[in-house]
Amino acid sequence: MALTRDELIAALRQTVEASLQQLVALQAADGNPGSLPDDEAEAAVSQASDDVYSTVVDTISAYSLAHNDERPRINRIPVELLCASLSHLHFEDLLTATHVCAGWRKLALKHATLWNKISTTNEQHLAAMLERSQAALLHVNVGMGTSRYEDEDRPLERVFRHTSLFDKKHSYNNLYAMLLPCMPRIHTLRIRDWTIEAPLEKLLHAPAPELVRFNLQTSGMHTSRVTVDRLFHGSAPRLRALTVYGMSLSSAALQNLRGLSYLELNVHLNDIADGVLAAVDDIPEIVVHWESSSLGAIGQGLAAILNGLQGAPGDGRAALQLLPPSQSICSLISSENHIRVIVADSGLVREIRNIDVESAATYTLGALSESIRTLSTLAIAASLFMRCTEDTLPYIEDLTIMLSIDNRTITEPGMLLEVNGRTPKLPQLKRLALDSVTYTDSFSSLFGQRNRRGSTVPSAELAAFIVRTGTKPALALIGVKASARGVSDPAYQSLVAAVASIESRA
């Protein structure tokens, strides 16, 4: 038990007093002071002094050991806190941590959940993680884009952009073979590969009773198009989110998957003819990559050229069949090649990416005229907004105008107000945003450029535009800023007077 400071002082005082009493006793031996011979008396006093010194040192040492504990400070970290800290380490760093000391190594190897989050392309790493994770559910990410320095959420197209189109120097077949016997305990699985070969096909047909999220992205560059008829052998009862890019899923494969809440896949004309999505029209959220401009289609096109074949890209207007009727939506996001809608009554979300500009415009303008009474939230590319007619948007409460790199209608003086006499009336508008970041970066095409940021909106013209809408909304400027020569600039003050508030962020 640790001694307090007062207890230590009391112990030292008792030690000193006992030693002094011993000295006095030596001097008064037999009741005759000085009766001991000089040499014996000197030796007795010296011994008593040594005893005092030793006792004091022993007492202080005992106090020090009791106070500081015999364990190093680093080993006194609570187990729960240490495990939580180690769980944030990447695999290589976690390995390093297991060599800090025997205590840390024993603790790390004992806790399986430190090893069940696997992101690697290395066979030795995968083998070690599978062994050390014991029976824990696994979260697996293998293939391209699994480097600790890469953004694992970036689109597959951006991963391929920095890779040779015909580079097959990396093969993950051994990884798939190692994962196959572990499929019964895989909870989330993400795979990025150039092609689908036999080991991966076996993995895709294995039952996955604990799988809740699956993401497969391939380029289709090095192999003919693969169709999976029974994904996970029809046995993935917990699967809720499915993303498949670069590979066809038959209607039978989708019918075997019950309980999905999110589905993302690439689709072409044949898939529509086969009724692929008709089998899953009750899924709450579906995102479609229209194949006429997806990377998979580019790969198929290159393959056709190399084989002397001819083929025509799919008609973008056919992709509009995948969207709900334009008169039934309450929320619409529409860039020049991307549409995302929410159905008013059911709340279903439908999204199409990589369609052509005119097809996007056809649906968007139709929705703006046909969903007058249901459409309340709109995010629209500036080029499409300029095509809106007056009195088109009477029930819009939240309007975002997306600014693209090649669109100058907003960011240059005199251009925004080309809508001068026909600015749509927005009597219900509560929020207006000019955004060059949020939507357009995430919806950029494979070879598209990033949008410029830091553009300046002319304050006076923006204020006049807002006044003509007939409302005083909150204004958000995202990636842009309003022109001002200081807070007292009359043009900027007119903008301040035209809105309820101004929010600016990069």
Image (cartoon, helix red, strand yellow):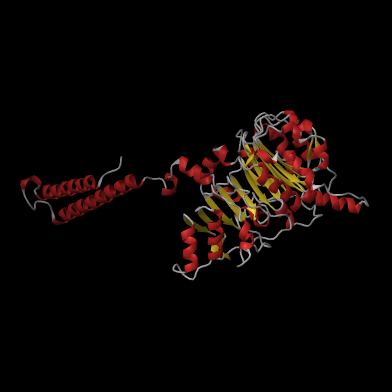
Viewer-proximal residue among 365 and 311: 365
Q: How many marks?
A: 0
**Placement of the N terminus among the 4 image quadrants:** top left
Front residue of this view, candidates 37 and 254: 254
- Residues 174 and 322: in front is 322
**Where, quadrant-wise, is the C terminus in this rendering?**
bottom right
Residue 103 seen? no
330 relative to 354 in the view: left or right: left
Q: Which residue lies furthest to the bottom in this view?
A: 485
Q: Residue furthest front?
A: 421
Q: x, y (%) of residue 120? A: 67, 47
Residue 83 appearing in the image: yes
Residue 491: % across, % down: 50, 67
Q: In this view, does 146 lie above or below 417?
A: above
Q: Nearer the viewer, residue 143 or 457?
A: 457
x, y (%) of residue 411? 61, 64
Q: Dividing the picture into quarters, in which one does residue 366 lie?
A: top right
Residue sitting at x 51%, y 41%: 107
Residue at 50 percent of width and 42 percent of height: 83
Residue lying at the far left of the rendered structure: 32
Percent x, y of residue 98: 55, 47
Residue plotted at (75% across, 47% down): 193
